[in-house]
Amino acid sequence: MKEKPFLTPKQEQVLNFIRKRVGERLPPTIREIGEELGFKSTGTVRDYLKALMQKGLVKRMNNKSRAIELTERASIKIPIIGTINAGKPNLAYEEIQGYVDADDLFLGRLGFDDVFALRIKGDSMIDAGILNGDIAVIKKRPNADNNDIVAALLDNNEVTLKRLSSKSGKFHLEAANANYAPIFEEFKVIGKLITVIRKY
Amino acid sequence: MKEKPFLTPKQEQVLNFIRKRVGERLPPTIREIGEELGFKSTGTVRDYLKALMQKGLVKRMNNKSRAIELTERASIKIPIIGTINAGKPNLAYEEIQGYVDADDLFLGRLGFDDVFALRIKGDSMIDAGILNGDIAVIKKRPNADNNDIVAALLDNNEVTLKRLSSKSGKFHLEAANANYAPIFEEFKVIGKLITVIRKY
DNA sequence: TGACAGACCACACATTTGTGTGGTATATAT
DNA sequence: ATATATACCACACAAATGTGTGGTCTGTCA
């Protein structure tokens, strides 16, 4: 008995082309897909799209140009790999543990309006793994919970990233670095840390 | 003399709608824009698009449906703020220091083919600010430079993230945690760390 | 020997979508 | 007073794009 692959090679090519185009911004038209893969008939492409739809990989809207959507299942993902088999020359993707969705990995469906970023200066949060130069993505909020890392506005009009801490009912700010003293002065929480990104 | 805003309010509405749709996957058609903003003529929308193009905010391709692209200047960005003025109730965006491009902040124009991610287990790189649970985005490469952080394949078929180090001509792997000994055994570099992402 | 899926093509047709010309009206600049 | 820009609308038309029907050929499954 042969292995019945989930997708035929051609189907995968079609899907990959859609992935590529979606990633590059504009989903392709039916004719663009055909052109790319060498199909001379739009009907052929529709057959493939039908197959991909039946397998739950793409969704479409009727009569709308370029309205091809990748489903959760097919969207652009980065594989999270675990152990790699040394016998293989390339990464053994059979050992994939899961996927990181390229899109919502970091921004996802957040409204862009309530999000801003701070570039970290200094080492006051180094013990929390937040280094100088990192980008801290903050979701605006006027408050946060105990132990959350927050962006706070200090009296001197500076913004700082610190851990919110409550001792005996009152909130204060704590650095994650023994060289910095906690801040007990007035401050205002302006947002909560949701993501840290560091580029090398 | 009145302030001459860069964009009229309506122009900004059009731009924001395009931003929204682009972010949601499918750029709008001219008629979709008109519908959203209450324009009854496609000509009106084209006038706006023309204005936005002249201001260098959008690019278009002729005769292609939905082929509206945001330029660098107009693309979806997250502001990096610096000092915040305490006098204002909201974030003072006048003090924006720059922008992080939402897209290429982390994945950018990398080919998805040569990228994978590892979820960090353990604390062996903690002094490099890479914590348990972080996602390390790796670009596949068979080699790297001294001091690069790399994903390496060990003899026991495990993948590990360590700093590549050369002493006396020979490469070995070093953890960023005094509790872990350097690795002098055989290993193969499979990729180089390009980004670390941590979600809270 | 069907039955059926994969892999195609040819075309006609319907819709959607982009283009272009020509208006109207208001406000500001010169 | 006359441009010039904003701010629209109405249409006609063309090009792009999606839909649908009806094939052919091949291989596999039962």
Image (cartoon, coloured by chain):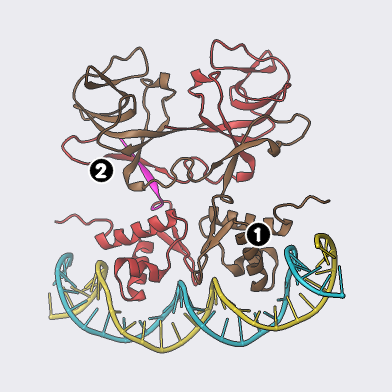
Chain colours: A red, B brown, C yellow, D cyan
Compared to B6, does B143 lie above or below? above
Eye-nearest disc, 2 or 1: 1
Compared to B149, does C17 lie above or below? below
Quadrant of the rendered structure where residue D7 is?
Answer: bottom right
At 61% from the left edge and 70% from the top edge, which residue is drawn?
Answer: B31
Which is nearer the eye, A200 or A104?
A200
SS type, badge 2 = helix
Residue identifier under label 1: B14
Amino acid type assigned to the residue bearing label 1 in the image:
Val
Give the magenta range: A74-83
Can you see residue A57? no
Q: Residues within 10 Å of mark 2 (few under 14, many from 20)?
A: few
Task: Check the residue under mark 2 and report the chain it is in.
Answer: A
Give a yes or no on whether discs 2 and 1 share a subunit: no
Amino acid type assigned to the residue bearing label 2 in the image:
Glu
Residue identifier under label 2: A94
